Image: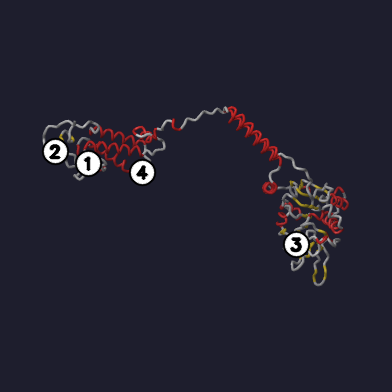
Amino acid sequence: MTPNLRGRRAFILGAATAASSAASLLASRPARAADFEIADTEWEGLSEFFSIAKAELGPDRVKPVALLDWSSVKPEDGILFIHPTETIDPSEASEFMKLGGRLAVCDDFGKGDELLRRFKIQRIGMPGRPVTALRQDPDLPIAEPWLEISKGQIGAPHPVVANVNRLVLNHPTALIHPDLSPVLKVRLSGSEGEAIVAVAGQVEKGRLFAMSDPSVLINSMLRYPGNRAFAVGLVKYLANDNDRAQGRLFVVTNAFKQEGSVGGDRTVLQDVENALRSFGDNLADIRKQGFPSWLLAVLAAGAVALLGIWVGRASGKPYKSPLPRYARATPLVSRGGVAGRFAMLAAPSSPKGLVLLELKSALFDAVAERFGLDPSPSADAVLRAVRSSGQLSASMQQSLEGVVTRMQRAEAGMVTGAGGKVRREVIEEAHRVVRAVVDALGALEPKRSIGRSYGGADVQPPSDGAAGGAAPAPNPPGPTEPDG
């Protein structure tokens, strides 16, 4: 199969795979209305509660909103949150109640608990089995108004439940309340005592009401007299109590948005807090429910586009047959001899100290060969032999000693792992001195006699033990013979 045919086949397979993935991601889900919708007339909707609110307050005073403008609410108004799935702005809610507004939160598993925590209200599961339940179902417990008993006298119930005898709950949670007053309770069997499901309290001029079961207000639950009486009492308490004859009731359910500020002034800090809170809510929703369908569609389209680009470029790119390993040229570094050593020393990754050590090795080998020293002479033996030869000037002798000292330092650094960092000018100076010394000593010239010539006289080479500076004893005079 030719490369072009392979490329076209890869493109077709990749495009088919991407299209299949995109189709699975974009597969439509059956649409279903969310619970607690005002316009929903089914059993889990709130259309019946909306009708009760309009009958008590009038159609113009009941405001179901999906966008709550805090700047438009007034102290005589009431706000009812039913199963909010967005975080209620705690600063605006507190300011609204401080000015005299009344706010109620009916929620069991939504995000109303974030506002409740600000007022030290904690939402927990039902701690025990109820004594009384509808059809003996523990998930449908019966709640009763909380009656305060003081000095043998039974107090009046809270205005919201003034006309409630029994309230049917539906899978409720319970509340822990260190400061607020209980409103509704569920009697528990055994030694569990009672579970509080509704509390209320004063926030400066305003009021806060918290209920742990929003299901008491859905259409199917309002057929019970106690639930219907509770709905009427909650509407009156929020927007039609005493001096609230003109108050409005804002009903907020499920997902909603917020804007503005109570009193009309909103600081930059409040805007930042609101933005951070919205960002946190979005992350929590993604973690809980996954990415929204539109975002999945965008990601799928992007993936298909990137895959198509990659496949197109890969299929249109010509490929050359790789050269077999055995037929490839051997790099200079891998070769032996002079070429391999030169490539190793010239490599950018090689320490420059190696070049200095190479010059040292060449110098010592040349001197040892010239004067018949040991194959690996010491630096003292080399300098002593050169000094004794008398063939170098004083300045060249001093330069040679300095170069040998630098060579020894570089070698010590390489051995100890301190590195072989040597400046270029040091290497150039060492090369110049070594070359001059070798030329002056005639170390590269061919041998002429068995002995070695020191300044024109044939003498024996100095031993390592000879005192420095002592002139070697001359050989007996006689004719010299050239090396064979």
User: Badge 4 is on which residue?
Assistant: 414
Between 234 and 254, the one lying in front of the other is 254
The image quarter containing residue 333 is top left
User: Badge 1 is on which residue?
Assistant: 384
Marks 4,3: beta carbons within 8 A: no
* Real-space Cα separation, disc 2 to disc 3, in angstroms: 119 Å
Work out whether mark 4 precedes mark 2 in sequence or the reverse, and give the earlier one: 4
User: Badge 2 is on which residue?
Assistant: 474
Between 368 and 114, the one lying in front of the other is 368
User: Badge 3 is on which residue?
Assistant: 180
Image spot of residue 356 (x, y percent): 33, 38
Q: Is residue 208 visible?
A: no
Identify the colour scheme used: secondary structure
Number of numbered tags placed on the structure image: 4
Work out whether mark 3 precedes mark 1 in sequence or the reverse, and give the earlier one: 3
Comparing marks 1 and 2, which lies closer to the viewer?
2
* Real-space Cα separation, disc 1 to disc 2, in angstroms: 17 Å
Work out whether mark 1 precedes mark 2 in sequence or the reverse, and give the earlier one: 1
